[in-house]
Image: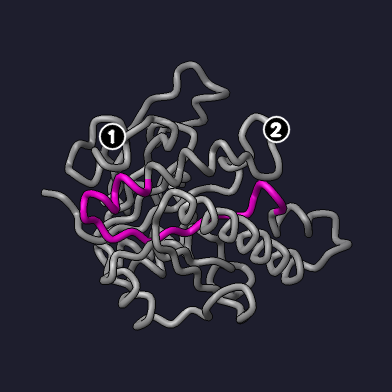
Amino acid sequence: MAQKRVLVKFSGEALAGEAGHGIDTKILNYISQEIKSLIDAGIEVAIVIGGGNIIRGVTAAQDGIIKRTSGDYMGMLATVINAVAMQEACEHAGLEVRMQTAIKMEQIAEPYINRKAVRHLEKGRVVIFAAGTGNPFFTTDTAATLRAVEIGAEIVIKATKVDGVYDKDPAKYDDAVKLNKITYEQALTDHIKVMDDTSIALAKDNSLPIIVCDMFTEGNLLKIIQGDLTNCSIVK
């Protein structure tokens, strides 16, 4: 059965393409077309994007020069840059978009207001949530799960560079085994890095399925939402 309202989480690193940093407009265009296919199918879509292609709070603070709180705020601002770029790409594809930030910056976007976000979704607009939760020490994975719960999304799709969850890094280990189905408890107990533990625990408390898939498989998002879970992993 097809889902009606979903939240898609994109990593910031994925936006960088082969360059490894910054924003690749070809990838933005590709993502916007994938999102358009969902909207055209009558699905309500919210988006959260990370900021790792620009800066990660943990990385910025690792040598002690920058405090972790400041590093995390820098990371939040990075997600805003990515969200502005994504908004432009989606609008270029003919979509109506509203961007909401957890940190107020009215010249750029609306502040996050739950009722307003839901109303935008009901009107067929793509809603992009930026600046994480607005709090340091919380990742954009947690922000994605939190916003999904708040707006009543039926699933969270984590769109990554791999086709699902493995027992270890498939880029480093040839014998890595793909895990098609995982319980919340297994992900937490075995420290399987689907998303960070806080986000998984929040999803578990709210019975919110998390689906991990390869964002670069064209049409994959729509297939997943329509119930085809062949090329992905599910945590529930």
Q: Please provide percent x and percent y for residue 210.
A: 33, 51
Q: Is residue 161 left or right of residue 55?
A: left
Q: Is residue 102 magenta?
A: no
Graded by Cα atoms within 10 Å as few (under 14), some (14 to 19) or many (20 or more), the crowding at tag 2 reads few
Q: Please indicate, yes or no, whether residue 226 appears anywhere in the rendered image.
A: yes
Q: Is residue 67 left or right of residue 187?
A: right
Q: Which mark is residue 180?
A: 1
Circle 1 SS class: loop
Q: Is residue 75 left or right of residue 198?
A: right
Q: Is residue 80 left or right of residue 176?
A: right
Marks 2,1: beta carbons within 8 A:
no
Q: Nearer the viewer, mark 2 or mark 1?
A: 2
Q: Please provide percent x and percent y for residue 207.
A: 24, 63
Q: Please provide percent x and percent y for residue 155.
A: 28, 56
Q: Please indicate, yes or no, whether residue 150 appears anywhere in the rendered image.
A: no
Which residue position holds label 2? 19
Q: Amino acid at mark 1?
A: Asn
**Residue at point 31%, 77% (across, down):** 119
